[in-house]
Image (cartoon, grey):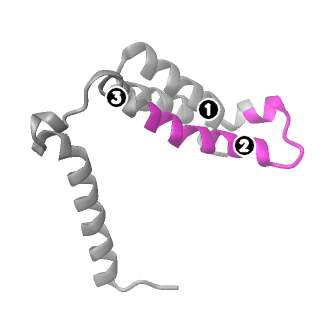
Amino acid sequence: MTMSDGYAWAAIAGLVLVVFVTRNAFMALPRRFQPTGAFERALRFAPLAALVALTVPTAAEAWLVPGAGWLDVWHDGRLPAAVATVAVARIAGSPFAGLAAGIVVLMAIGGLG
């Protein structure tokens, strides 16, 4: 199935709109609708949760190769990069630092091959 340029740009614009509205909704809502308590504390962990949600499926893909052992999985690079990403993001408190560390580890091991 192919998509025309117009549909592709419409999809991108729609995604930008949805992301913009959902990320800025708490600033535009009245104070009585602002998150409080446990929900507000849970929102602080959203960036780390997003990193984990992105890295775990990619790292787990290395285990799906038939006949892959533990050593093969570690030499693939995705699992060590995922571990580095989560560890550095957690220790540094910055998802961007974790992402940078994961990229460095992945490239140091040799990419995905």
Q: Is residue 16 magenta?
A: no
Q: Is residue 69 magenta?
A: yes
Give amino acid for label 2.
Answer: Ala
Main secondary-structure element of the magenta-colored stretch: helix
Q: Which residue is mark 3?
A: 39
Q: For label 2, count other residues whose C-alpha is less than 10 Å away and answer few (under 14), some (14-19) or many (20+).
A: many
Range covered by the magenta-colored residues: 49-73
Return the x and y of residue 60 as percentages of the image width and height: 69, 41
Tell me which label, 1 or 3, sits earlier in the chain. 3
Farthest residue, direction front: 32
Task: Tell me what residue is drawn at x 80 percent, y 48 percent.
Answer: 65
Tag nearer the camera, 1 or 3: 3
Question: Disc number at residue 62?
Answer: 2
Find numbered disc 1 in the image and state the secondary structure of the residue it sits on. Answer: helix
Q: Is residue 110 above or below residue 80?
A: below
Q: Which residue is mark 1?
A: 109
Query: Seen in the image, is 16 located left or right of residue 86?
Result: left
Give amino acid for label 3.
Answer: Phe
* Disc 2 to disc 3, C-alpha distance: 35 Å
Return the x and y of residue 104 as percentages of the image width and height: 48, 30
Find numbered disc 3 in the image and state the secondary structure of the residue it sits on. Answer: helix
Task: Tell me what residue is drawn at x 18 percent, y 40 percent.
Answer: 26
Farthest residue, direction right: 67
* Disc 1 to disc 2, C-alpha distance: 14 Å
